[in-house]
Image (cartoon, rainbow, N blue to C red):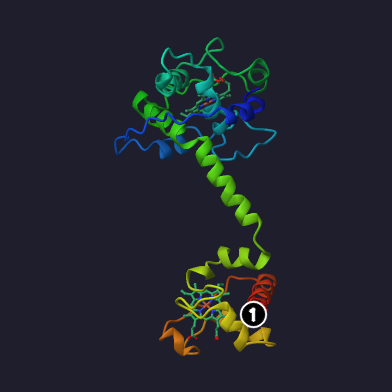
Amino acid sequence: MIKLLLFTSLLLFFNACDEKEPAKNLDGKILTEQKCASCHNLNMPPVISDDELAPPMMAVAFHMPDFMKPKDESQRIPMAIEFVVDYVRNPALEKSKCDKESIKRYGVMPSQKEKVSQDELQAIATYMFNHYTQENLSKIQKDIAAFNALTPGEKLALKHKCLGCHKVNKKIVGPSFVDIAKKYKGSKNKIIQAIKNGSKNSWKSSNGAVMPPFKQINEEELEVLSDWILKSNS
Ligand code: HEC
Ligand code: HEC
């Protein structure tokens, strides 16, 4: 089925994307979310579930160009776009590129003729082949790997946007975490209270900049964050 073939097609991917700007009222991304997300999972990499109604959109988009038989390689994506525009409005078993097992599992896609116009589909299909690319997938996977490699403290500092105002080694808006660790060595509770309640005028170096209170951070996260800040000085 499409998913199984996905990983072979990842290796063979292309970058002949058509970068035509869609008209303003035809935003392919928004339209895809509105018109296709009820059946196709749009995440990249996809979230796969046992009761999904259709193959994930990434699998469809990665795979579709491989089925086109252009005379000229530059026509591969335009042909795939054309296929999508037609198929979504007039789907049929004999047109489907899905293998038998997927068709058995999902059934043939119900026609979306009443729900999406040809112009809208043009924008959707163009977006699909611009967005679901090996290049974008690699970028996202790199970001995910980088995030997973962070310590729990670093993850929380990112999650709660501490890093917009603090760096570990360098003062920016607020003092560096190393300087904070030096000042509050051995008094973790001071750090926890400062995060909860915010802070002002404790640091001359901040020139009157204020730290807002972070009431929404729970006790467990406060422990992890303050331990991490204290450890930045070791
Ligand atoms: C009601 C559920 C549903 C909606 C909504 C839906 N699809 Fe599908 N789609 C399916 C199913 C089921 C399949 C797999 C069977 C098939 O290929 O017909 C599929 C398959 C496809 C295929 C692959 C066809 C092939 O030959 O392999 C494309 C392309 C596609 N959908 C595009 C879209 C786009 C674009 C949208 C939004 C405009 C959309 N679909 C909305 C259910 C849906
Ligand atoms: C909008 C900018 C901003 C954000 C976001 C921010 N801080 Fe601060 N932070 C500051 C400033 C400015 C100071 C110094 C304020 C002062 O002079 O008392 C500070 C001070 C601190 C202090 C020392 C407080 C004191 O009283 O000495 C700690 C601890 C701290 N921040 C931790 C954090 C953590 C953890 C986060 C994320 C949950 C965070 N900050 C998010 C701006 C910010």
- Can residue 82 be spotted in the picture? no
Spot the residue most to the top.
94
Q: x, y (%) of residue 143?
A: 57, 51
The quarter holding residue 100 reads: top right
Tag 1: amino acid = Asn
In screen coordinates, is 114 left or right of 232?
A: left
Q: Give the vertical position of 147 relative to 27 (above or below).
A: below
Asked if ligand 2 lies within 8 A of label 1, the reply is no
215 vs 206, nearest the viewer: 206
Position of 103 relative to 44 (above/below) = above
Q: What residue is at 58 percent from the left and 68 percent from the top?
A: 157
Give percent across and percent down for residue 72.
41, 16
Count of residue discs: 1
Examine the image and state in which quarter residue 11 appears.
Answer: top right
SS for tag 1? loop
Residue lying at 47% horizontally and 38% vertically, measured from the top left: 33
Q: Which residue is mark 1?
A: 233
Can residue 6 be seen at all in this image of the molecule?
yes
Q: Position of residue 196 (x, y in %)?
A: 58, 79
Q: Residue at x 65, y 55 (%)?
A: 148
Q: Position of residue 23 (x, y in %)?
A: 29, 35
Quarter of the image containing the C terminus?
bottom right
Depth check, front residue: 21 or 175: 175
Q: Is residue 162 above or below residue 197?
A: above
Give the position of the N terminus as an image quadrant. Answer: top right
The quadrant where residue 51 appears: top right
Mark 1, residues whose alpha carbon is within 10 Å: few (<14), some, or many (≥20)?
A: some
In the image, is residue 71 above or below residue 40? above
